[in-house]
Amino acid sequence: MKPKSKILIIAGSDSSGGAGIQADIKTVTSLGGYAMTAITAVTSQNTTGVKSVLPITPKEIEKQILHTYNDIKPDVIKIGMLHSTNIINLILKVLARTKFKKIVLDPVMVAKGGAKLISNNAIKLLKYKLIKKAYLITPNIPEAEVLTKTKIRSLDDMLISIKILSKLGAKNILLKGGHLKTKYTYDILLNNNKMKIFKNKKINTKNTHGTGCTLSSAIATFLSCGKPLKKSCELGIKYVNQAIKSNLVYGKGNGPINHLNSFKINRKFL
């Protein structure tokens, strides 16, 4: 199968394979895209939590991005974990240099187990500078609470939060509602000043490690194929829900999802 589009992913590595660059590559590949990467940090982690984070130097990140970008032009850039002000300033400089517009930003701040992955100064820079550069941002509820300095306990709170994010300069926003304690998940898309709520029955499982990385990469892949934003979000959410339903029981903590749910593997290989 020939890949239909090219996505450059700028994010951190997850040694357990469930989130970060590993989840991004699996997602893009499973959906028929071609994944390229610039690794911002190497984490030592498993399903129970993050043990350590080793930053990659800004200069090396810059070389990864530009050497790839100048040779294989991406259709969409997906940005994930950016843990320091130096890294975010570098990304801002590179984006200004390339003038690239189709950017999906997943503002990764906290790991599934609760470990903080980004400094306070980096949060401020992301909030006031980088958000404005993205075509779409995909915060979950804890991330939106940090960015908007509000508490989100209901669908109404999500609607208030998304309006605050819009005032920060975000062009399009997909606020993910999986953290709400409800029977259904509500993901809200703000696009062209119009709200669209994606409602799905919540799947009862603790194995959801990497869902945020996966969703943003899935949306980036569908966008790169030329699909409209609303449809890309709809298809991305569907892909993630199918991946969660597989309920992979790997590890002792928050297990990964099944990125191969889109594949139909020939039985002779099983």
Image (cartoon, grey):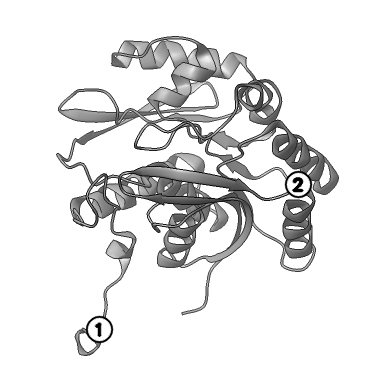
Circle 2 residue: 58
User: Residue 107: image x %, image y %?
Assistant: 54, 34
Distance between the alpha carbons at the discs numbered 2 and 1:
43 Å
* Residue name at image x 18 percent, y 53 percent: 247
Q: Amino acid at mark 1?
A: Asn
8 versus 11 height, above or below: below
User: Residue 147: image x %, image y %?
Assistant: 53, 19
Asked whether the residues under the numbered discs 2 and 1 touch, taking CB atoms below 8 Å apart as contact, a structural biologist would say no
Instruction: Judge whether residue 162 can be spotted in this image.
Output: no
| Left or right of 121, for residue 184 | left
11 versus 121 height, above or below: below
User: Residue 100: image x %, image y %?
Assistant: 74, 46
Which of discs 2 and 1 lies nearer the camera? The answer is 2
* Image mark for residue 266: 1
Q: Name the residue nearer the viewer: 202 or 193.
A: 202
* Residue name at image x 66 percent, y 34 percent: 84
| Left or right of 154, for residue 190 | right
Q: Secondary structure at mark 2?
A: helix
Q: Earlier in the sequence, mark 2 or mark 1?
A: 2
Q: Quadrant of the C terminus?
A: bottom left
* Residue name at image x 19 percent, y 85 percent: 267
Q: Residue furthest front?
A: 51
The picture quadrant where one finds residue 231 is top left
